[in-house]
Amino acid sequence: MTDREVETSEQELARLEQELVAAKRDALRTISENAQKLLTGTQQLFAAHWDARTDLIKTLISVASGAMVLSVTFSNSLLTPQVAERWKYLLIGSWVSFLASIILAIVAFWLLSEARAYPSIIVSEYSKVAQAVEAIKTEADSEHIANIPAIATLEKFRFDTRSKYMLRASLLAFVLAIVLLGVFGVKRLGF
């Protein structure tokens, strides 16, 4: 090889490296734009649902706390010597159910806030995307990049699903507490 051929080869190699860097930069920009579209779309899609669930959780916590506080406050007048021992367990059971309802609602609220943090999950995964783009050598490598946002999306759905289950459990505990308190009240009234 002559010096001129070596110089031409080096120039060609430098040009190809510049094209590769530009292509990787374009790929990263495209991925970033698509991630932003995905974020905006999912946030708009779930915003009303998450707001409604958040309001339900807050209401459930307030009502369960209020019912528990009221029944505990008036427990001296409710638990008189005329009330049989077995009926007192209904009142205690309702307090435990109210407490379980409150705790489960708080956990549901926390899980829902984690699901709402979906944009930050994608942003935290962005560095992995950038590293993966830099490491692209073949087309098969690019398939891994598409999976990174999908994994973050799956994580959001896990938190959302867990939040739903916790809210359902909280609602069931609340209904149980109301039923127990209602049965105790009916018995206390002498029906």
Image: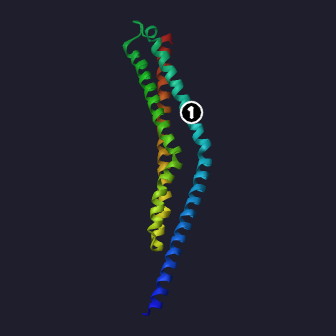
Residue 147 picture location, percent across and down: 48, 61
Residue under the image location 54 percent in, 66 percent down? 25
Q: Is residue 61 visible?
A: yes
Residue under the image location 56 percent in, 67 percent down? 26
Residue under the image location 41 percent in, 16 percent down? 87
Residue 149 picture location, percent across and down: 50, 57
Q: Colour scheme used in the picture?
A: rainbow
Above or below 110: residue 96 = above
Residue 15 picture location, percent across and down: 52, 79
Front residue (pair 42, 16): 16
Front residue (pair 31, 74): 31
Front residue (pair 59, 29): 29
Name the quadrant of the N terminus.
Answer: bottom left
Q: Which residue lies furthest to the left in this view?
A: 85
Amino acid carrying label 1: it is Leu
Residue under the image location 45 percent in, 62 percent down? 131
Residue 47 picture location, percent across and down: 60, 44
Q: Residue furthest front?
A: 3
Q: How many numbered dots are placed on residues in this image?
A: 1
Above or below 114: residue 151 = below
Above or below 10: residue 169 = above
Front residue (pair 124, 163): 124
Which image quadrant for residue 36? bottom right
Q: Which residue lies furthest to the bottom in this view?
A: 2
SS type, badge 1: helix
Q: Can residue 164 be seen in this view?
A: no
**Residue that mark 1 sits on:** 56
- Disc 1 residue crowd, few under 14, some 14–19, many 20+, Cα 10 Å: some
Q: Which residue lies furthest to the top in this view?
A: 81
